[in-house]
Amino acid sequence: MTPQRKVWLAAALWVVLAIAIWNVIFDRVVVLAGRRFVYDATLSARAGVYLRIDDAMRPAIVDGVRRASVVALSVVLIGVGAIWLVSRPTRR
């Protein structure tokens, strides 16, 4: 395998890692918001007030996308920076 191909493979693996991390963070934020909504809806229904799921989940989705994107972008930048440092030619 040529050095250039190794660099591309390493970059692709960093992108795959960032995508996996994005999915985990987004899923976790949405699941926790869903659980929080169910708890709040149960308590408010006992009091005769009914919550709308849209009011709770829309902000959670936006927050999940924002958080996941920041972390995934950071992972890609760190990976590309590491690849750049390792793959640059050494001067003697």
Image (tube, rainbow, N blue to C red):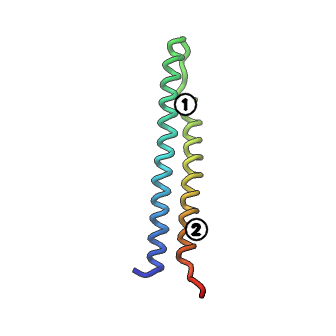
Q: Amino acid at mark 2?
A: Gly
Q: Residue at x 58, y 68 (%)?
A: 81
Query: Residue 23, image x and y in percent?
Result: 47, 49
**Quarter holding the N terminus?**
bottom left
Q: Distance between the Cα atoms at labels 2 and 1?
A: 40 Å
Q: Helix, strand, or loop for circle 1?
A: helix
Residue 66 falls left or right of residue 23: right
* Label located before the other in sequence (2 or 1): 1
Whether 27 is drawn above or below 2: the answer is above
Where's residue 80, x and y in %? 55, 67
Q: Say which residue appears at 57% left-offset and 83% top-offset.
A: 90
Quadrant showing the C terminus: bottom right
Residue 81 bears which disc, if any? Answer: 2
Q: Position of residue 27 (x, y in %)?
A: 47, 42
* Residue at 54 percent of width and 34 percent of height: 57
* Residue that lies at the very extreme toward the bottom in this rendered image: 92
Residue 52 position (above or below residue 13):
above
Where is residue 33? Give x, y as percent. Answer: 52, 33
Asked if residue 21 lies left or right of residue 84, the reply is left
Q: Can you name the residue that lies furthest to the top here?
A: 47
Q: Is residue 70 above or below residue 56?
A: below
* Mark linked to residue 54: 1
Q: Residues within 10 Å of mark 1 (few under 14, many from 20)?
A: few
Number of numbered callouts drawn: 2
Point out which mark residue 36 bears: none
